């Protein structure tokens, strides 16, 4: 039987490799730090130039802003109010009412709300005409909708199940 020799202090083939890698990493760290300081100085210089240019531009713009037409300012305010009104439309109640009114006989294909006219155009497909009548009745029972009208309907003859495509127009009562 041969003796087992355990050598836990084996000498690596390149003892200086760790020191060399540490030195390279330290050099890269110093170069990166120097570059960071250089970029900071450049940024400060650019910010100073931009601030100078901004001050000169605001002095020129202040004279031009006093000449601004009142109608143009009114138009901008109206546009901002229109955007705000569109953002505050209660979309959630509309979609909840439409989702709760559906059943397995009705498939919605398109919903086209018209905020200015307070109307919603609903396009869909039903298994039969009676399903459309039931759907209209159910929509009229929702608090979000006023009167609901059937605009048109068309039986799809090429389909073996003969579904009915329809278009409804519903008065939309916005409530926040």
Image (cartoon, rainbow, N blue to C red):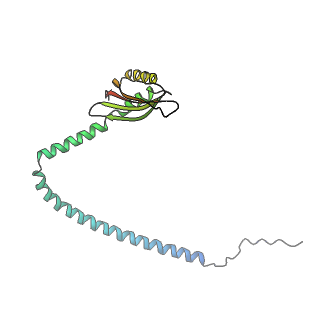
Left or right for 68, reference 132:
left
Q: Nearer the viewer, residue 25 or 113?
A: 113
Vertical order, 75 against 35 (above or below): above
How many labels were placed on the picture? Answer: 0
Vertical order, 174 against 50 (above or below): above
Residue 150's x, y, as percent? 36, 26
Q: Quadrant of residue 176?
A: top left
Residue 14's x, y, as percent? 64, 79
Vertical order, 54 against 167 (above or below): below
Residue 102's x, y, as percent? 46, 27
Q: Nearer the viewer, residue 8 or 54?
A: 54
Q: Nearer the viewer, residue 15 or 107?
A: 107
Q: Quadrant of residue 52?
A: bottom left
Q: Looking at the rendering, in which quadrant would you find the N terminus?
A: bottom right
> Which residue is rendered at x = 48% and y = 75% of the image?
27
Q: Quadrant of residue 129?
A: top left
> Which residue is rendered at x = 52% and y = 76% of the image?
23
Vertical order, 85 against 63 (above or below): above
> Which residue is rendered at x = 34% and y = 25% of the image?
149
Q: Return the residue found at the far front.
A: 157
Left or right for 73, reference 158:
left
> Which residue is rendered at x = 23% and y = 39% of the image?
81
């Amino acid at each position: 039987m041969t003796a087992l020799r355990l050598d836990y202090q084996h000498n690596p083939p390149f003892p200086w490799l760790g020191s060399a890698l540490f030195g390279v990493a330290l050099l890269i760290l110093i170069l990166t730090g120097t570059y960071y300081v250089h970029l900071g100085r450049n940024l400060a210089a650019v910010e100073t130039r931009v601030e100078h240019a901004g001050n000169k531009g605001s002095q020129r713009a202040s004279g031009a802003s006093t000449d601004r037409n009142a109608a143009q300012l009114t138009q901008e305010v109206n546009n901002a109010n229109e955007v705000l009104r569109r953002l505050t439309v209660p979309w959630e109640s509309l979609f909840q009412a439409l989702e709760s009114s559906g059943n397995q006989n009705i498939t919605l294909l398109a919903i086209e709300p018209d905020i200015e006219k307070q109307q919603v155009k609903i396009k869909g497909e039903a298994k039969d005409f009676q399903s459309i009548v039931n759907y209209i009745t159910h929509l009229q029972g929702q608090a979000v909708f006023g009167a609901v009208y059937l605009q048109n309907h068309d039986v799809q003859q090429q389909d073996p199940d003969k579904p009915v495509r329809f278009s409804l127009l519903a008065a939309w009562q916005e409530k926040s």
